[in-house]
Amino acid sequence: MPSLNAKPGLHRSVSEWTSNNQQLSATAQHERHISNVIRQEGRTLRNETNFKTRWDETDTCRRLSDRVWDVARWKEVLETCAQKVDEEMETLTLSKEHTEQALAATAVPLEVTTECLTLREGRQGHELVTDPVDEQLKKEVELIERVQQVLQQHTSRAFEQLCILQEVRHQLTADLQNKMDALDIDMSCLSLTIKSPHISLKTNPTRIPSGSSTPQEWVQFSQHNVARAHEAMQVSQQIREDMNLTRAQLQNELETQRRATEFALRKRNHLEEQARHELEWQIKTTEEEMAEMEIDIHGLDADLQAKTANLKLAHTRLETRTNRPNVDLCRDEVQHGLVNEVQQLEATIAALKQKLSEAQHSLQKMKLHHSRMLQDLSRKQEALSLEQRSLNTRARLTATSSTDNKNSALVVPLANSSGRSNLQLLAQ
């Protein structure tokens, strides 16, 4: 047979074949060992990571639950505080309205008092006196102006405090809104699971957002809002107490002064009536005396005329007897009697003339004084009329006081400065 030529380089020896087989077996065994180790480590890693993941998720849920509880607790605190602030605003607003009503109620007393002063300025002559009524009326005007100033100050202070409470309430509402938003977010996170449809991988989720705060800052922020609200409410309560006390005190002062003024006015009116009655009596008696004086003057004048006739008779007799002749021109008893008669008549006439002059002068003075008394009576009647008008004008104060007492019993609807009667924070 022809010989076959072997291919060079393709044949291996038996030892090489055996060695190759052994190497393959060893390599396979080594790779299986490595694979087994990796599998065991993989299973261990899976178990550990599963436990770790479940623990982390459970711990996160617990922390979320705790956080939700903390936020809900602070939410309740803020809601309660905001409700108290709203109630305090309503109460302060009502007290401020009462103070404004009290301030408005002083307009009528001031108008009445000023009108009384103006009326009494219409007195004339000696009736225009500075009496206790003027003093009381001026004191009343000063008191009313001081009351208006004090009430206006309280009203302004209450308005400023309402602005502060409104600002505090806004801060509480904003903080409460943040708490409710955070509560919704945390509740939403707490409800998420791995089977939720909207979960996905995010870009850099572990970043720290700008404006982040620490838990201590978070607590301090709400504590500061609540503390500021309590402080504002305490100040508001003090302002309300001051306003109520001041209103009561000022009302008592006004009432006391009103009674003092009316007492002085009634007393003055009584004195005016007494003076008028006295003057009327004086006028009446003066008129009677004037009538009597006129009668007496007529009598004196008649006597004077009669005495003048007697004097003429005596003069005529004396003059006629001077015509006696010679020795018969004797200064006899008749002559002496006629001389004495003439002297007596002349003295009587002089006395009557003097008395008549005095009577006429007295009558003239009484007439002049009577005219003055009539003028003064007219002024007194006018002054008395003005006093009576003042009393009638001040009757408006009593009517106003009764109306205020009735209105105070009416129910006034509560409303804060924003016009709401109830606290409406945010939709739950």
Image: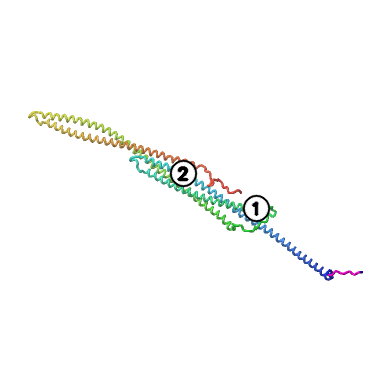
Residue 348: x and y in percent read 19, 33
Q: Residue, x 45% and y 41% (percent of image)?
A: 400
Which disc number belongs to residue 216?
none
Q: Tell me if 239 is positioned left or right of 209 in this view.
A: left
Quarter where residue 305 is shown: top left
Magenta residues span 2-8
Secondary structure predominantly adopted by residues drawn in magenta? loop
Question: What residue does disc 1 label?
Answer: 188
Q: In this view, does 70 lie to the left or right of 126?
A: right
Q: Is residue 6 magenta?
A: yes
Which amino acid lies under the numbered mark 1 shown in the image of this protein?
Ser
Q: Mark 2 points at which residue?
A: 104
Point out the frontmost of discs 2 and 1.
1
- Nearer to the camera, 266 or 144: 144
- Residue at position x 70%, y 60% in the image: 49
Q: Which of marks 2 and 1 is nearer the N terminus?
A: 2
**Residue 214 percent across, percent down from the top left:** 59, 58
Quadrant in which the N terminus appears: bottom right
